[in-house]
């Protein structure tokens, strides 16, 4: 029987595999390292928007180590509806072979030379990690236009501006939200705590090159399931303006998309496309417990991006109870416990939490700085603990199509999260060492 196969080399050994198993062949370029994995796991490799565990076939077959990785060929194989990426040394040929049965596995013969098929099923049975799991992209519909455009009128530095009312979720005084983390990121002022939920707030004054105000209100903007705060001074009212009375800006990239006349003033309208782009780029998911949106229809997930021993991780927001300043938190010694991985105890809202010594677990040296934070985390099984991290970098919403999950309890990485062109390890809150 004739079979088309790929012939490839691993060190000095040559194998073949039927093309029926091959989903794709590409070359390793961008590798994300993953801590506390089996020694045959090189890391995560990205191809398109998908991530795969990159496995060292030499190591699995006890041939050698994978010392050279970048620009080496990768066989992306599909077996039983799962995809596996194997690093090899060289693609030799795509050929048609005669297949014969053998006790040692399937053998392929050509010109009196016999090659052994890669024992894929045996290899996969020896793997202790499942493949990364990634969702498909979902599309979200947009709002339709109406004859009259509802606008919210507000002031900033004694100037009047308008914004489309369809984006307004709510408006709160700045005194009703607490600053958690200040940012110097474009026109984002920082992360605030609003009703026990994280809210990223943009400073419109920064965008307009005006002096920022420390007083005023925050307009909570919403587009689909994402929200973003907008810092302004004062709300002046709601208006219904006919579309025909709005002069449209010819350049769609401008901050103001149009203008209208109101009480002897020309009022600029903040561009809806810029608002939508800003919410999409910086906004966070609205708390679904307070809406009719069901969790299974959430196509994005919020993450806290942290630095831990100079490695970047993404921690699911839903699993974070609070963030504390390390320098302002009292930590007892571990005299009350004999567990070697417990650094001490901390008290938050009349509840005691174990502060885990993650530096000791990872065999790293920790040097506290002014940016060091304490995260109090809850697992999906309601187990709670605290850890110290180097710093907080950002809060982001990520499409589930850009999250590759790796369910396990033996590694600090539970998958890969991709944001723009950068990838982060998904922090494994259920790592068994934490228990």
Image: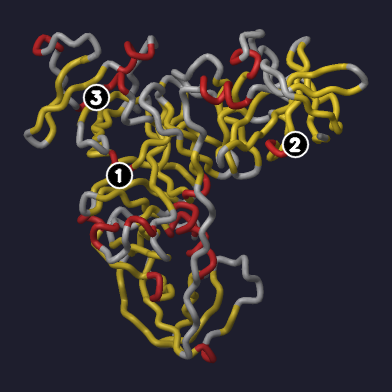
Q: Residue furthest right?
A: 111
Using the image as rendered, state which of residue 194 and residue 363 is in the foreground.
363
Q: Which mark is residue 19?
A: 2
Q: Earlier in the sequence, mark 3 or mark 1?
A: 1
Q: Which residue is mark 1?
A: 318
| Mark 3 or mark 2, whichever is nearer to me | 2
Determine the secondary structure under disc 2.
helix
Report, in whole angstroms, how far the alpha carbon at label 1 lies from the one at label 2. 42 Å
Other-residue count near label 2 (Cα within 10 Å), few / some / many at <14 / 14–19 / ≥20: some
Relative placement, left or right, of 111 versus 126 is right
Other-residue count near label 3 (Cα within 10 Å), few / some / many at <14 / 14–19 / ≥20: few
Relative placement, left or right, of 64 versus 171 is right
Report, in whole angstroms, how far the alpha carbon at label 3 lies from the one at label 2. 58 Å
Q: What residue do we see at 18% from left, 26% from top?
A: 329
Relative placement, left or right, of 56 versus 366 is right
Using the image as rendered, state which of residue 208 and residue 250 is in the foreground.
250
Determine the secondary structure under disc 3.
helix
Determine the secondary structure under disc 1.
helix
Examine the rendered structure and indicate whether residue 122 appears above or below residue 203.
Answer: above
Q: Earlier in the sequence, mark 3 or mark 2?
A: 2
Q: What residue do we see at 74% from left, 33% from top?
A: 18
Q: Quadrant of residue 195?
A: bottom left
| Mark 1 or mark 2, whichever is nearer to me | 2
Q: Which residue is mark 3?
A: 327
């Amino acid at each position: 029987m004739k079979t088309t196969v790929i012939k490839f080399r691993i060190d000095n050994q040559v194998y073949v595999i039927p093309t029926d198993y091959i989903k794709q062949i590409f070359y390793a370029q961008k590798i994300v390292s993953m801590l506390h994995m089996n020694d045959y796991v090189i890391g995560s490799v990205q191809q398109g928007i998908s991530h795969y565990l990159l496995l060292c076939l030499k190591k699995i077959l006890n041939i050698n180590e994978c010392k050279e990785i970048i620009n080496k060929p990768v066989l992306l194989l599909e077996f039983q509806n799962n995809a596996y990426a194997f690093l090899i040394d060289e693609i030799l040929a795509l050929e048609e072979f005669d297949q014969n049965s053998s006790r040692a596995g399937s053998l392929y013969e050509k010109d009196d030379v016999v090659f052994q098929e890669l024992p894929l099923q045996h290899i996969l049975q020896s793997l202790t990690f499942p493949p990364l799991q990634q969702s498909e992209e979902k599309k979200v519909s947009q709002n339709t236009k109406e004859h009259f455009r509802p606008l919210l009128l507000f002031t900033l530095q004694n100037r009047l501006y308008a914004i489309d009312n369809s984006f307004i979720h709510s408006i709160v005084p700045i005194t009703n939200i607490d600053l958690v983390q200040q940012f110097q990121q474009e026109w984002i002022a920082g992360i605030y705590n609003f009703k026990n939920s994280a809210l990223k707030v943009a400073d419109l004054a920064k965008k307009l090159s005006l002096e920022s105000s420390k007083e005023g209100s925050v307009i909570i903007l919403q587009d689909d399931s994402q929200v973003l705060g907008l810092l302004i001074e004062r709300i002046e009212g709601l208006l219904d303006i006919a579309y025909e009375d709005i002069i449209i800006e010819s350049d769609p990239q401008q901050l103001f998309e149009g203008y209208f006349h109101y009480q002897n003033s020309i009022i600029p309208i903040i561009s809806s496309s810029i608002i939508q782009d800003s919410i999409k780029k910086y906004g966070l998911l609205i708390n679904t417990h307070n809406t009719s949106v069901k969790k299974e229809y959430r196509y994005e997930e919020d993450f806290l991006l942290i630095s831990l021993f100079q490695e970047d991780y993404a921690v699911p927001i839903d699993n974070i109870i609070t963030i504390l300043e390390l320098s302002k938190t009292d930590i007892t010694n571990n005299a009350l416990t004999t567990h070697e991985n417990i650094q001490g105890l901390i008290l938050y809202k009349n509840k005691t939490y174990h502060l885990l010594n993650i530096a000791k677990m990872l065999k790293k040296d920790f040097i506290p700085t002014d940016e060091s934070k304490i995260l109090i985390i809850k697992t999906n099984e309601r187990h709670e603990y605290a850890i110290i991290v180097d710093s907080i970098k950002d809060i982001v919403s990520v499409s589930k199509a850009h999250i590759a999950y790796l369910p396990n309890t033996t590694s600090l990485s539970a998958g890969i999260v991709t944001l723009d062109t950068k990838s982060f390890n998904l922090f494994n809150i259920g790592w068994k060492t934490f228990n």
